Image (cartoon, rainbow, N blue to C red):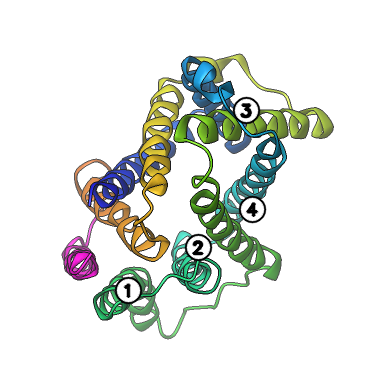
Amino acid sequence: MLWAGLVLFYGIVKGFRDVVKKKALTKNTVMEVLFVYTFLTFLFCIPEAPAAFKGFPPKFFFLIAIKSFVIFIAWICSFKALDNIPISLYGVLDLSRILFSTAFGIFVLKEKGSIYSTVGLLLILFGLLFLKIYPEMKKRSDTRSTYKAEKIPPIYVWMVLASCICNAISGCLDKIYMRDINSSQLQFWYMLYLVVFYGLYFIVRRIKISSSVWKNGWIWLLSFLFFIADKALFIANSYTDSKVIIMTLLKQSACIISIVCGKFIFKEKNIGYKIFCAGIILVGLVISMIGQ
């Protein structure tokens, strides 16, 4: 069950990482933060270079490039969409990654979900959906006479869905790749390719990076959190008994961290229903672990 603990750790760190990301974006643009934290994360991977080269199967130079390109597309889509649509709508659409990841686990990796994981999945989905939909429903009920539906360009909805599909594909590839390579090899080459892809993107689009971005301490912290979280996730994938279905559910622990940080760091209001939703999600996580 060590792999489950590692994935739970990933989910918790991811929750804190989202908070740090929000802090980082208050000082620099989306693309600046995206490129620099990817580059800094790669620097954290450099000490693993000897292990990354040793016994590395040549075919994985191409295979990992595919994974990196998938994530490159996913991050571009998610950041662009989040910058142009309401966060509540983005949150609801982002839930589809659970369904995509579960589908890949069942139909590609031939994993079998237990009754516990099924019940856990349903509870997590209910908790997340209620968390995102309830505030919007309340808003509509309180402004029946003046509320006007927001017009969302379909392209941004498709971007969120594309991001979810790409993340699900990446998770599936991780599980497949870790059968033949170790976590150091996957993380080193994966991050190197991402730096190359984003570097080429900046060159082609002629995007300039301000010098202030290197002084943004939140980006440095974000990079470190990203490094340790991905390390834990890749190690978890190396366990033969680990399942993408269960890992997908455990990753939702990030939502609980976001709720707590929203209360105590960003001083958000109406926290009561969020705590209720967090309780449902927590119960779903516990139930999904039973029998594993």
Q: Which residues are magenta?
A: 269-292
Q: Amino acid at mark 2?
A: Tyr
Q: Are marks 4 and 3 in contact (CB under 8 Å)?
A: no
Q: Residue 253 at x, y = what percent?
A: 28, 55
Distance in Å between CA atoms under marks 2 and 3 = 29 Å
- Check residue 90 in the rendering and tell me which mark sits there, or answer none: 2
* Relative height, residue 12 to residue 281 (above, below): above
Specify few, some or many for label 1: CA neighbours under 10 Å numbering under 14, 14-19, or 20 or more: many
Task: Say which element carries label 4.
Answer: helix
The residue to which callout 3 is attached is 192
Tell me the distance, in whole angstroms, between the alpha carbons under discs 4 and 3.
20 Å
Q: At 66% across and 32% down in the image, what residue appears?
A: 193
Rendering coords of residue 141 (x, y %): 35, 83
Residue 226 in the figure: left or right of residue 273: right
Name the secondary structure under disc 3: helix
- Compared to residue 36, the image places residue 66 above or below, namely below
Q: Residues within 10 Å of mark 4 (few under 14, many from 20)?
A: many
Residue at mark 4: 77
Image location of residue 88, percent across then percent down: 44, 65
Q: Earlier in the sequence, mark 2 or mark 3?
A: 2
